[in-house]
Amino acid sequence: MADHGYIYAVSRIRSREQQLLTTPFLESLETSGSEEAAIRLLNEHGWGTAGQSAEEILEEEGRKTWDVIGELVKDLSVFNVFRCENDYHNLKAAIKEACTGGTHPGIYVGDGTYPAKKMEEAVSAREFAALPERMREPAERAMDTLLQTRDGQLCDCILDRAALEATRDAGRASGSDLLALYGELTAAAGDIKIAVRAQRTGKDREFLSIALADCGSLDSGRLADAASDSMEALAAYLDTTAYSGAVEALKKSLCSLERWCDDLMIEKIRPQLTNCFGLDPLAAYILARRTEIKSVRIILTCLRNGCPDSVMRERVRATYV
């Protein structure tokens, strides 16, 4: 669809942006005193209804986002870059279910590009050719790895890398600069977090070569070399890249690093608040909604578990508006 075809959709999204959560509102949730009080504030803001659990509210808000976008855009495949991760979540679930036997209700998620039920059936029958083409090889390799080694972490690494690369490629294929940026940043942020975890747990270079995705803004070979050496070497390499800002966050904690990665994406999409044309403002709205839902989930979880205020402040993401 040509850019002018999105003018009406963007105008609708502009009105929806007025309902996005602000930093002061998130702060009011943080200081509400309890999960129940925070949920009441959310109810007053239009999130959920009295009697719903936190998870029910969050799931409903996620559905609302796609319902709105579905009303405005006939072909949701333009947003496959956001849906790839759900496909690979379901693939991971299907493989583990097939390898362990039995059924496990609630392990699959919606909003993927391929029906979870079909994925479950294909994996259970080892009919990998029934899967989307790019999923076939990693699915078979991950399943064989799990069956032969019983190493669930290695199985996850194979599929997590495939998910990052699928997201990267979907962004590049979208025709949208913002979605291409999202795909690239997702792959790069995923690699950085994998490298940090691998370094902290003493994983070797071979593990990193399996786990790290290829992306344009990071050299996965140099990243693997640095992570298999030391945390200092890893920080030194990141300092030479576009992700030098991650180094300071890395010194604090992995949670700070994850927040830094999400906040970088919000920073990159904010110019879309004044863009009246094209697909990018719609993509930015989806990202804004996903990020605020993540922040609300963090706050509610922290309140439920009695976490200190400092923990919430460290983890809550920046807002779009």
Image (cartoon, rainbow, N blue to C red):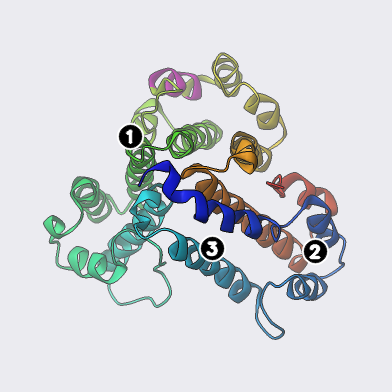
Is tag 3's residue or tag 1's residue first in the polypeptide sequence? 3
Estimate the spatial distance between the alpha carbons at disc 2 and disc 3, rounded to whole Å.
Answer: 30 Å
Disc 2 and disc 1: Cα gap in Å?
A: 38 Å
Q: Are marks 3 and 1 in contact (CB under 8 Å)?
A: no
On residue 70, which mark appears?
none
Residue contact at pointers 2 and 3, CB within 8 angstroms: no
124 sits to left or right of 111: left
What secondary structure is marked by label 3?
helix
Q: Give the camera-side residue of 169 and 2.
A: 2
Q: Amino acid at mark 3?
A: Thr
On the picture, is 159 further left or further right than 191? left
- The 10 Å Cα crowd at callout 3, few under 14, some 14 to 19, many 20 or more, is some
Q: Position of residue 97 (x, y in %)?
A: 31, 68
- The residue located at (38%, 45%) in the rendering is 160
Q: Which mark is residue 65?
A: 3
Q: Which residue is mark 1?
A: 210
Q: Amino acid at mark 2?
A: Gly
Instruction: Find numbered disc 2 in the image and state the secondary structure of the residue it sits on.
Output: loop
Residue 306 - label: 2
Give residue 241's quadrant in the image. Answer: top right
Q: Which residues are magenta?
A: 221-227
Q: Earlier in the sequence, mark 2 or mark 3?
A: 3
- Mark 2 or 3, which is nearer the eye? 3
How many discs mark residues in the rendered view? Answer: 3
Taking depth in this image into account, of 259 and 183 the one nearest to the observer is 183
